[in-house]
Image (cartoon, rainbow, N blue to C red):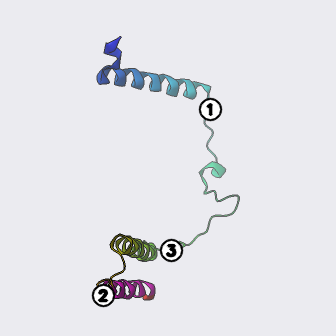
Amino acid sequence: MNILLTPPIAFLIYVSLVFLIYMLGKALASPESPSAAKSSLYGSGEVAPKEMAAPGYRPFMVVAFFFAVLHLSILVIASGGLTPRLVPYLLGVLIALVAFILG
């Protein structure tokens, strides 16, 4: 029985089991009937918008960098403690966050 637990044998058993389940599902499924409704975009019953909401990743990346700087600075502040050496760091973080907000 231990031979069934070896990785190659277990892999072959799992692959064959998955293939059998796949073939059973294919046999139980109804035949395919392509239509225009099936190939069109679906958006909760509404017509899909024609233009892009936000072209590219730039708007997302600005927000992502803002929150990354904010969260990492909070982790650094929380791990260090309130000392006078922290003031230049806080000013740098503040300048970076303002730069991200202004774009």
Dot 2: few (<14), some (14–19), or many (≥20) neighbours within 10 Å? few
Quarter placement of the N terminus:
top left
Q: Is 18 situated left or right of 91 in this image?
A: right
Q: Is 97 situated left or right of 7 in this image?
A: right
Q: Quadrant of residue 91?
A: bottom left
Q: Is 47 situated left or right of 81 in this image?
A: right
Question: Disc 1 and disc 3: Cα gap in Å?
Answer: 39 Å
User: Residue 66 location, x and y as percent?
Assistant: 42, 77
User: Residue 59 location, x and y as percent?
Assistant: 46, 76
Secondary structure under the numbered disc 1 in the rendered image: loop
Tell me, for residue 88, which label it has, or none.
Answer: 2
Find out whether residue 96 is within the magenta segment: yes
Q: Main secondary structure of the magenta part?
A: helix
Magenta highlight range: 87-101
Q: Name the residue under label 1.
A: 31
Secondary structure under the numbered disc 3 in the rendered image: loop
Question: Disc 1 and disc 2: Cα gap in Å?
Answer: 68 Å
- Residue drawn 30% across and 87% down? 88
Mark 1 or 3 closer to N-term? Answer: 1
Q: Nearer the viewer, mark 1 or mark 2?
A: 2
Q: Name the residue under label 3.
A: 54
User: Residue 16 location, x and y as percent?
Assistant: 42, 22
Q: Quadrant of residue 96?
A: bottom left
Dot 3: few (<14), some (14–19), or many (≥20) neighbours within 10 Å? few
Mark 2 or 3 closer to N-term? Answer: 3
Q: In which quarter of the image is residue 9?
A: top left
Residue type, mark 3 in image: Ala
Question: Disc 2 and disc 3: Cα gap in Å?
Answer: 36 Å
